[in-house]
Amino acid sequence: MSKLIPDYVFESIYDITPALLQQHGVRGVLIDLDGTLASRKAALPPDTLAPFVRALHEAGLRVLVFSNNGASRVGRFCEALGVDYMSRAVKPLSFGFRRAAKRLGLPLHEVAVVGDQIFTDVLGGNSVGALTCYVQTLDRRHFWVNIRYRFEHRFIERGRRRMEARERHE
């Protein structure tokens, strides 16, 4: 059960700062695409996304978009954003995370996984020892996402409490 609890819970990716990641020894970030960086319906990145990715790069963090989607969807989005990607990531299976960390040239304990799904992003990231950051999905109005959220809600709340307790002790 603890593998389903994120280390951090955020409203959006824009709440994640390079300083927070670096405090945990993070040098690279695997970021989910659909529901995390943009709505699953968005073919291209929103204008607000490039400054976020640039801030990560300027802080010396390596960034890889890490998606279970196909290469045509992920490639088009990431080329417009100017960031490297890995499609068909097979999350939550650990070998996909290991392959992505190798691509970043980092050990998994120096990687953060950012995503909007407990059963893929958080489970997979926790299983390999990465820092996990859950963000509220951008696709909240989609019927199946709301169904999924009902199963994930308890884990998200436990992650939020874990994060708040950590902040009180720092």
Image (spheres, rainbow, N blue to C red):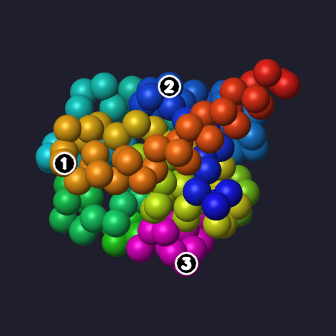
Q: Secondary structure at mark 1?
A: helix
The answer to which quarter of the image holds residue 105 is: bottom right
Q: Residues within 10 Å of mark 2 (few under 14, many from 20)?
A: few
The residue shown at (34%, 40%) is 137
Determine if the magenta segment contains residue 100: yes
Tell me the residue that label 2 is attached to.
Answer: 15
Q: Assign a secondary structure to mark 3.
A: helix
Residue at the outermost right position = 169
Disc number lying in front (3 or 1): 1
* 5 horizontally vs 48: left or right: right
Q: Quadrant of residue 48?
A: top left
Of the numbered discs 3 and 2, the one sitting upstream in the chain is 2
**Residue at horizontal 37%, vertical 47%?**
149
Residue 95: image tag: 3
Nearest the viewer among 55 and 15 is 15
Rendering coords of residue 16 (x, y %): 54, 30
Q: Residue at (20%, 59%) from the top-left corner?
A: 73
For the C terminus, give its image quadrant: top right
Query: Can you identify the residue that label 1 sits on?
Result: 143
Q: Is residue 103 magenta?
A: no
The nearer-to-camera label among 2 and 1 is 1
The numbered dot on residue 26 is: none
Of residues 23 and 54, the one drawn nearer to the viewer in this rendering: 23
> What's the distance in space between the residues labelled 2 and 1, CA to CA?
26 Å
Q: Is residue 120 above or below residue 44?
A: below
Q: Earlier in the sequence, mark 3 or mark 1?
A: 3
Marks 3/1: CA distance? 31 Å
